[in-house]
Image: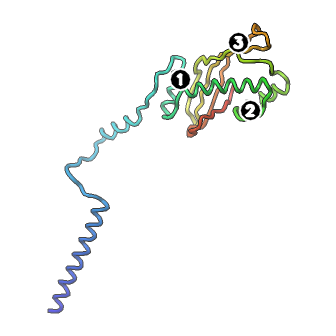
Amino acid sequence: MVYGDLQFFDIIIFAVIAVFIIYRLRSVLGKRTGFQKKPTEQQFVKKQSVQQEVQIPQLRENEQKLEVVYKHIASFEHKSFLEGAKKAFEIIITAFNKGDKNTLKGLVSKNVYNVFEKAINEGTNNPNAQFYSLVIDGIDDAKVENGKITISVNFISEQVLSDNEEDVVKNKDTWVFEKPEQSSGPAWTLIST
């Protein structure tokens, strides 16, 4: 009888271990409640399309090319970009006119800096020039490629070249700004004029 009692004792130990394992598995994996269907392919595609829909704000006709940037960069705001581009234009042109190479160095690419530096060294800048007006005439091009956002902006500017307000020069320029796609900061670099 002693041998039979040991078998019964072994069965109880194994039953306790099995109950403990089932309890732990259930607490880790959870339990299935109700009738749960497997997601169909149609539901999966629907979820994907909802995630891919991007809210593109209403753009003016001359800003339509910015849709490309909105489709790739969810945090892009064209109004902030255009305000920043306008400020950058004023700062860069003012720094160039005054021969301020340090300011230029932080805002433009190396190639653009070399062109500005050469012009300053040759004395083709005009320290007396001042802004009279500046308007963004539209977006010439916009793209997101190779991890970079590149936007070409058309500017129309008027500058007074001397103390005489009748001595106004009107220019139309296309400047190309660039920044890394993953950058969350507001800093863009002028890469072409």
- Residue type beneath disc 1: Lys
Q: Which mark is residue 37?
A: none
- Residue type beneath disc 2: Thr
Label 1 to label 3: alpha-carbon separation: 25 Å
- Residue type beneath disc 3: Lys
Looking at the picture, does residue 169 appear above or below residue 113? above
Looking at the picture, does residue 116 appear above or below residue 25? above
Identify the residue under disc 2: 103
Structural crowding at the residue carrying mark 1, measured as other residues with C-alpha within 10 Å and reported as few (<14), some (14–19) or many (≥20): some
Q: Which mark is residue 65?
A: 1
Residue 28 percent across, percent down from the top left: 32, 61
* Residue sitting at x 74%, y 24%: 94
Q: Earlier in the sequence, mark 1 or mark 3?
A: 1
- Tell us which disc is closer to us: 3 or 2: 2
* Residue sitting at x 80%, y 27%: 99
Structural crowding at the residue carrying mark 2, measured as other residues with C-alpha within 10 Å and reported as few (<14), some (14–19) or many (≥20): some
Label 2 to label 1: alpha-carbon separation: 30 Å
Which residue is most to the bottom? 2
Identify the residue under disc 3: 170
Q: Earlier in the sequence, mark 2 or mark 1?
A: 1
Is 158 left, or right, of 20 in this rendering? Answer: right
Residue 148 percent across, percent down from the top left: 59, 36
Is 164 left, or right, of 59 in this rendering? Answer: right
Looking at the picture, does residue 179 appear above or below residue 25? above
Q: How is the image coloured?
A: rainbow
Task: Residue 112: name its quadrant.
Answer: top right
